[in-house]
Image (tube, rainbow, N blue to C red):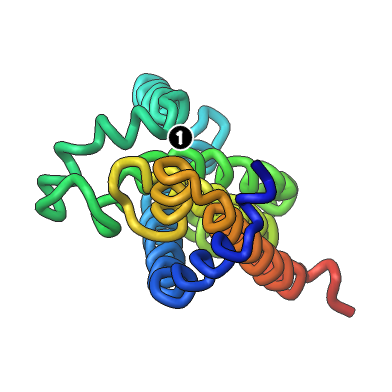
Amino acid sequence: MYDKVFSSQAFAEAMTVMQNEFLFALWETIYVTVVATAFAIVIGLPLGILLVAGEKDGVLPLPKSLMGILNIIINLLRSIPFLILMIMAFPLARLIVGTAVGTTASIIPLVIAAFPFVARLVESSLREVNPNIIEAAQSMGASPFQIITKVLIPESIPSLISNFTIAITTILGYSAMSGIIGGGGLGKIAINYGYYRYKYLIMLFAVILLIILVQVFQSVGTYAATKSDKRLKR
């Protein structure tokens, strides 16, 4: 079996596919991952802030019922397996982009799956902020908005960047799964050639590229988090 996988014919076919399809698939994967992550952060960041600031002892207390509903919605969306969520998001994708399949359409379920995850990551980052700093800002008469924008967020920047890096690598993994419903990118190549046609060498190359992308995103995120950490500056 493995002799056929790594045969000269299989290798030649893989090289042809790489030359003709891999570059565009790589671009599609990066495009979907970055755009979906950006939208997930735009939605998840304020939700994560509300989860912390809106608590009973937070800087901007919100009604307990509202906080309960917010937590339930986030937990429900996080508990739905991504494959099922992609199918459930068909009508919304068709409404927004005009189709339920394709590269752009796959961004919709990716955002829906990712923003609750991002919200929890943001919540985790903000809870790491020293309460004494918040109390000091309150004692000086800072408003809730000022505390959020000038204390909570700036103090948690390194942690936020680290968690956003986790989010983008997770979304990258989800984007590969979107190939099952017609999404583009490296996931589509891996599924079309590896699963449907048993061209395992092509699938292996697609997986290697995905691993390289994860390493690139992780390295950039780690570097940015380290550079933004004031504790590491002398």
Please tell me how crowded label 1 is: few (under 14), some (14-19), or many (20+) other residues with Cα within 10 Å: some
The image quarter in which residue 209 lies: bottom right
Which residue: 40% across, 60% down? 185
Find numbered disc 1 in the image and state the secondary structure of the residue it sits on: loop
Q: Residue at x 39, y 29 (%)?
A: 77
Find the residue positioned furthest to the right. Answer: 234
**Residue 219 falls left or right of residue 103:** right
For the N terminus, the quadrant is top right
How many numbered tags mark residues here?
Answer: 1
Residue at which label 1 appears: 61
Residue drawn at the location 36% of the way across and 23% of the way down: 69
- Quarter of the rendering containing residue 196: top left
Residue drawn at (52%, 43%), measured in percent from left and top? 59
| Side of 156 where 44 appears, left or right | left
Q: Amino acid at mark 1?
A: Pro
Name above or below for residue 145 compared with residue 63: below
Q: Nearer the viewer, residue 39 or 127?
A: 39
Residue 173: x and y in percent read: 53, 48
In this rendering, position of residue 190 left or right of residue 152: left
Does the image show residue 156?
no
Q: Please state the horizontal and vertical placement of residue 136, each as a whole percent of the image.
A: 69, 53
Q: Is residue 209 visible?
A: yes
Q: Position of residue 157 (x, y in %)?
A: 64, 62
Task: Decide which of 203, 53 is in the foreground and name it.
Answer: 203
Q: Quadrant of the C terminus?
A: bottom right
Image height of 28 relative to 202, above or below:
below
